[in-house]
Image: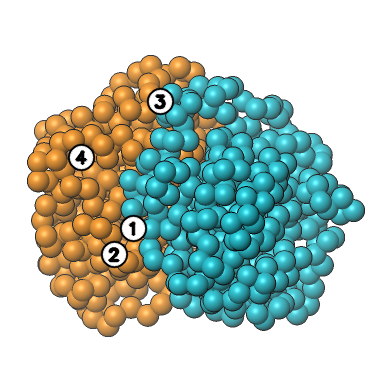
Chain colours: A orange, B cyan
Amino acid sequence: MKKFLNNPEAFVDETLEGILLAHPDKLKALPDTPRVIIRADSVKPGKTGIITGGGSGHLPTFLGYVGQGMLDACAVGNVFASPSAQVMYNGIKAVDQGAGVLCLYGNYGGDRMNFDMACEMADMDDIICEQIRVKDDLASAPPESEENRRGVAGLFFAYKIAGAAADKMMDLKGVCEVTRRALENIRSIGVATTPCVLPQVGSPTFTINEDEIEIGMGIHGEPGIETRKMMGADELAELLIGKISVELPLGVGDRAALLVNGLGATPREELYIVFRKLAKLLAQRGVKLVRPEIGEFATSMEMAGLSLSVFKLNDEELYNLYEYPAETSFYHKTGEYPS
Amino acid sequence: MKKFLNNPEAFVDETLEGILLAHPDKLKALPDTPRVIIRADSVKPGKTGIITGGGSGHLPTFLGYVGQGMLDACAVGNVFASPSAQVMYNGIKAVDQGAGVLCLYGNYGGDRMNFDMACEMADMDDIICEQIRVKDDLASAPPESEENRRGVAGLFFAYKIAGAAADKMMDLKGVCEVTRRALENIRSIGVATTPCVLPQVGSPTFTINEDEIEIGMGIHGEPGIETRKMMGADELAELLIGKISVELPLGVGDRAALLVNGLGATPREELYIVFRKLAKLLAQRGVKLVRPEIGEFATSMEMAGLSLSVFKLNDEELYNLYEYPAETSFYHKTGEYPS
């Protein structure tokens, strides 16, 4: 196994140690709960708190979005494993300023169960909690079983909207309302070409034939919806936007943000080649593209592949929240973008 | 070959097309010379121009650093191939505002020859050009043959210093002086675990045994100085900083910036684990660490591995230039960092 690590059991804690040593201006661990990462800067008094949580191995997801204009805390689990309810609860308590806390996370069994429990614990402390589960991965279940869908790179869009709303001092109800409205307009689909290797396992999590790709694979290597022969970038762009358009129709006068997310090993050059075709296809349909994101936002360690997330942004309020500035250890948004 | 592309011959132009579609606020192509990428924002009148150039396949290097506080232009070559002298010359002409132009690039044969020729062409137009060749890769030749050393991720530090100096309206002589002073204090060394695949070739550029790593490998797969058995992250950190310290001694009271650069496929988690050990080792020696950079800065497509660049920053002027704000399509620096 060619991974730069020491003891596989220490993989997550050593990663966290490195991140905290590198970004003391942005992040710190919660005293007595090193698996809760919170903002190092001062948070506006009375702001609605926002916490996320999930397994490790997806940087910048999740903790990379803790910071100004986005999240207040992240509960950090082991690789591909949920953090405990106790860790989540300590995080909730830390970020509550009396205005309540939104728990905003990907729809996975362990995270769901533990956040449910953490919110019950918070409730006993009279901390008002709301939960929103992100289920943007349309390949993970059919629309009629939407409650079974997983959260993938579309989480980034949800963090952006909720974080901006909270930074603008919206109350918990308002933050939840805009976030839910955003999620109705966010869909993702991924494609993988090579597997990843879990540090504690040391061998690939699955195999894909040398000439094939897996359409709809999840960020933990969950099976996709179909195996296809390797195809060109343009053909792939058409396939991905086609699948998303079924649920999120995009036509003349619509406005949308695209996120072309690398899963880990895929070069940026290739992400831009795919983005190029997506931008052209949408322009042909008369869709107005707003500031896109191209890079690594939700990875699966050294997995090769990419995902496309689309955020339909016809709604003026959501657009303004999307364009609101943010500054975290792994992400920043500033300045104007041609509209 | 599992690359997301269309025609391999169109790889670079389609990548550029995607980048320009994504970042119209930051970048544009030079009219009539699509292989010269320049800043889309307005440049301070009379500023010293800075141009770089080199082969493609290394994003964010090179064009990702064109922008505010860094570079004014980039001449873009094919994958791992120098751009032509004519393209470089057109770029030089475009960014000269009467104050002259610094050509700042990695020390590779083709780039050297073509920039020499481009500068001669500029000279005939009475454009004053200076050339600085970055030779930070200490594994590429012994110190006594320093002129044969290659430029790798340390280019980023050079761009940062030269760009800040030019943005502060230093004249060409001053920009060259601080950049040369910076380069005396910058050294890099890389290590690769897997090869990359050239789009036009379709197969790996070299092989490394399953249990081995190549110390000192270049960003085009140039042979390193030794092959070693795969080692732990801490051991690797000690090895890399040890090799750099021979030429750049770091001890009590010294100040240094670290750049832990992923070559393409290596997860961010692993980069942080290595950074963590480097930060500890230097702290033990009494070295004061300034704001580090951890991520992908100079890649080799899907090559796995990383490089360490160290910038000794005892010099107050260089430190202030290093901390000066920058904003490009692939990089930004803002805010305060604890000192």
- Of mark 2 and mark 4, the one earlier in the sequence is 4
Packing grade of label 1 (10 A; few <14, some 14-19, many >=20) is: some
Q: CA distance from mark 3 to mark 2?
A: 32 Å
Where disc 1 sits, the SS reads loop
- Give percent across and percent down for residue B47: 52, 71
Q: CA distance from mark 4 to mark 3?
A: 20 Å
Residue positioned most to the right = B144
- Give percent across and percent down for residue B267: 53, 45
Q: Amino acid at mark 2?
A: Glu
Packing grade of label 2 (10 A; few <14, some 14-19, many >=20) is: few
State whether residue A38 is above or below residue B119: below
Which mark, by number, is residue B25?
Answer: 1
- Give percent across and percent down for residue A309: 27, 43
Q: Chain of mark 4?
A: A
User: Which residue position is annotated with label 4?
Assistant: A283
Q: CA distance from mark 2 to mark 4?
A: 21 Å
User: Which residue position is annotated with label 3?
Assistant: B6
Q: Are marks 1 and 2 in contact (CB under 8 Å)?
A: yes
Q: Amino acid at mark 4?
A: Ala
Which quadrant of the figure has residue A200? top right
Q: Chain of mark 3?
A: B
Where disc 3 sits, the SS reads loop
Q: Are marks 4 and 3 on the same chain?
A: no
Q: Amino acid at mark 3?
A: Asn
- Give percent across and percent down for residue B64: 49, 53
- Of mark 3 and mark 1, the one earlier in the sequence is 3
Q: Nearer the viewer, residue B119 or A242?
A: B119
Look at 70% across and 71% down and name the residue there: B177
Which quadrant of the figure has residue B27? bottom left
Look at 26% across and 78% down and name the residue there: A97
User: Which residue position is annotated with label 2?
Assistant: A336
**Left-right relation of A255 to B69:** left
